[in-house]
Each structure stands twice: as C-alpha cells, then as structure tokens.
Amino acid sequence: MSLIPFPVPESQPYWDAAACETLVIQRCVDCTQCYFPPAPVCPHCTSRNVSWEAMSGRGTLYSFVITTNPWPQWQMTGPFSVAVVALEEGPRLLSTVVDCEQSPAELKIDMPLTATWRAFGDGPKLLCFRPIVEVGP
Amino acid sequence: MIRPGQFAIVGAAESTEIGRVPTLSSMGLALDGAVNALNDAGLKASDIDGLTVANLPVGNLAQQLGIHPKWVDGTSVGGCSWIYHLRSAIAAINAGYCSTVLIVYGESGRSHPRGPSAYDTVKPGSIEQQFDIPYAGPNLQAALFALPLARYMQHYGLTEEQIAMVPVVQREWAAMNPRAKLRQPTTVDEVLSSPLIAWPIRRAMCCLVSDAGGALVVTSADRAKDFPKPPVYVLGSGSSIESGPCSPAGVRDPLHPGFIRTSGQDAFRSAGLTHADIDHLMIYDAFAHNPIFGLEGLGFVRDGEAGSFIAEGNTRPGGSLPMNTNGGGLAYAHSGSYGMLCMLEAVRQMRGEASAQVQGAEASLVHGWGGFWSACATVIFANSQP
C-alpha cells in the first residue's frame, strides 16, 4: 500500500491546488452544494454541471481519535490526531489537527479550525488544520 | 418476496483450528472450513452448485474444491461480506440459478496477513488511498473505526468506563468457551490501564488478530429436513452501505446512523419479528464501541442508552439479551473479517450446541460491519419455521 497520494484525472485539480497550499473542492452549479471527494458528478443531485472552487479553509472539529503512532512520513513523533473536519462550506473530510497539544483536553469537539499544509514524506504537502486562536475582548 | 423460513442453513463449521494456524494460508483455512461444513451437512463437494467467497478468488476456490458451480458471488464489502453472500445466495436459489450454496471464509490474519487475501480496497488512486490513508497512521483500523466515538461520547455522555465494560462482559462469555483465546476474567481498571492505541480506544478494546476459516451451506427449507443436523431457518435479512470503505467521515449522521437503521428495519420487517422476539444477539465487535452503536442503530435501546445497557449487565450471561456469546472478536477470535464467525456462533446457538448455550433461545440476530463502519448487514435466524 503506497502512502503517497496517487492522483487520478478526477482529483488532479485538487492536487495541483494543494501544491500551491490552496484548498479547492467542487461545487455543483445546479444545486449549489459543495461535495468531497472529487468526482465528475454531484452526489447530491447527479448533475455533471460542477466546478472547482477555492474554499475558505475554515471548519470545525467534527470528531477525532488520537493515534499513538504517526506515519514516519509526517516527521512527527508521539501521538497525533486523526480528525474528521467539517468545512464551513459543508463537506466533511479526514485530516489532522496540528499546532496544538494532541490530547482530549485540548482537542474539543466543534472547535474552530483553519487550513494549514504540512509535508508528508516525498509526496505533496497535505491539508492539515490548526486551531483558530480566539482574540480576547 | 422470499418468505420467512423459506431457506435454511443445513451445514455450518469453522476451520479445524482457529487462533494461530501457521500451516495454512487464507485459502487453506477457507478449504478447511469448507470441507468441515460439507461434512457437517453430510454432502459431497459435487452436491454444491453455488459458491461464494470474499477477498479470495472464487474461481480458484472452486478449482481447489473440484467443483463447477453454476452461480458464484465474490462480492467484498469488508467484514460483513458473508452476510451479504447469504442474502444473495438465497435470492439466487429463489431465482432457480442454483440449489445448494456453500458460503466460504478463510483469513490468515495473524500468521500470513500479506498473503493472497490482501484486503485490496486501498488501491493507488482510490479515494481512500488519496484522502484517508495518509492521515490514518499505522493503527489505521482502530483510528478509522473509532472516528465517530469522540463526538458520540461528548453528545451522549458515554464514559471510557462504560466502553471498557464491553470487553469485561464478553470475557464472561469467553470463560465458558474452550476455543476462545482470552478466557480469563478482566476488569474495567485492567482495560483502562491497557495501552492507548487511538484515544479513546485502548488495546483491550481492540479485537484479537487471528487465523480462522469457516463455511455455511444454505438450501431451500423444503429440503432441509433431509440433512443430519437440525436446520437453522433464515427468517429475514437486511443490508446497507453509507460511505466509502475507509471514510466514516462520509456517514451522514454518525450519531443516528441511517445505514444501521435501514439494515435492521429490513431484517425485522422481512422476518416478521419484533425486538422482543430476539433471544440471542451477535453484533460484530472489531472494537468495543461497535456493539454500542449496533444496539442503538438496530433499535434494541434508544440512542445514547447502549453504554449503560451493557454496563448494567443486560448482555452478560443470565442477562435479558445475551450478546456475543462466543466471547466476540474481542475475546474469541478475529482474523480481520469476522462476519462469518458471528453467523457460525448464532447457528450453534440455534442448534443448541454452543459452548455457552443460551437455554431456550429460539431466534438470533446477527449484525456485521464492513469497510471501517461504512457497510453493514443483518440476518435473523430461528430454530423453527414461523
């Protein structure tokens, strides 16, 4: 099993944007909903009239585990989070939350997150998320 | 429509040995289980005209059994594939495609995990390979399967102590089963002091890693009384898929999972039974939280109540709803795909030949998962026709 993501024609725009540290996913022109993973057909209405769009990068932590062994490709040691992130635009995807302590005390369900990018072995930079630090009053 | 009890299991057996079987590959375990099931049914291989297997080439299995089936099914949707096969086999017999189907499973999950049974859902360029696997880490089974759990705990107040009660209770069943791997009692403290694998999942909340094979023979019930063992009737079944094989992120509402509800409701409706009719329950436990989600999705308890239902002892020996009575994947055996072993324990219970026999049990429900909680299937067995 190769760990380095292998693009296919339907996902190439995602990976081209990722190389520039930009998150793009698809929106259906007909029903206006965003969807993930990449596909030539909208899973909400089966329309082929779909287009790529840059996302805000903002989302929330839908759920997570903290796995004790990261892949060596992440160049991390110690526990790391495997996270389901709900994008502001709707879709949920798998990622990891970085730049915070990897503990149930720090990783809070529904905490606000924003996209960041991290090297993964010899492959492309991968989409990660970090907490949005609230600025106090 | 297929009527409740129109088809029956007339042969059922596990491989001669389970647990650690270094002398056999996945195919060898499959053949060993198949021959044991044929012997259990008093059939010759040439009596079989329908064949199913998952994660192994069905043609190679037919060749090695020396048979030429008219109908085959090699579908794999993960660990519950064999429950799907049972549904398809019944439909095929009902359609007249074949008359006697052998449903076969073999997996050298412990001794030869890189063998030809490789779980090949993760192909380069697949959705999982691009978007899930890079994040999952080496403990990917626990990490992916347990993804909905943290949100569930926060929403319903399920505690780590309640999750730990699942293996504690199942060890009580395993203690009565000489074939179970883990037969010693355990405690909540012991479970919660086992190493973390993927918080909140600890090692004692994870299934075993075993070698195992097994098989079932299914045919129409009007022939079923001609076989040496008492028939176990298939009353009803259901199945559903809600996401990709590695993407619990795609389940629409993990706190009220529609795919479990669909599968369970179809099983009860087709069987013509209600929850009160079920005397024995098998819910596939790859990880300790799986039976909690299953009890709720199938409607045995209300959403959010399964943790306390198990912790209060309802599923233990002598409880109101005996569950995972072989000890489960947590204490009996688990080779990577456990659905067949769930069905075989239910068949033993319906025949009255289980190690930890539930006295008077007349109807058993089996519910399995596939693809890290993205597919499921349900079947209801009984020891008499309705």
Image: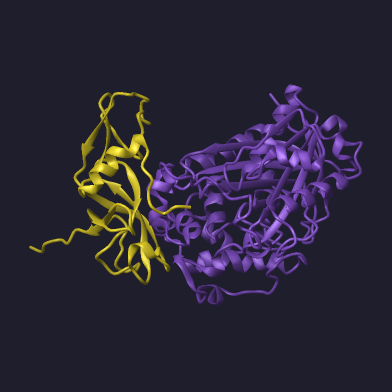
Q: Is residue B222 left or right of residue A130?
A: right
Residue in the picture at 37% in, 55% down: A63
Please state which of residues A108 and B61 is positioned toward the viewer in this rendering: B61
Taking the spot 27% from the left edge, 46% from the top edge, the residue there is: A87
Write down which chain is painted yellow: A
Looking at the picture, tell me which residue is in the foreground, A14 or A44. Answer: A14
Above or below, B232 against B181 in this view is above
In this picture, residue A118 sits left or right of residue B98: left
Residue A90 in the image: state x and y as whole percent: 29, 41
From the rendered image, report the letter of the chain displayed in purple.
B
- Quarter containing the N terminus of chain B: top right
Residue B159, given in percent of the width and then of the height, sits at 46, 65
Relative horizontal placement of residue B317, taking residue B127 as reference (left or right): right
Residue A54 falls in which quadrant of the image?
top left
Asked if one can make out residue B155 in the rendered structure from this viewpoint, the answer is: no
Judging depth in this view, the residue of B15 and A92 nearest the camera is: B15
Residue depicted at 23% across the width and 43% down the height: A17
Instruction: Give the side of residue B77 with respect to residue A76, left or right.
Output: right
Q: Residue furthest front?
A: A122
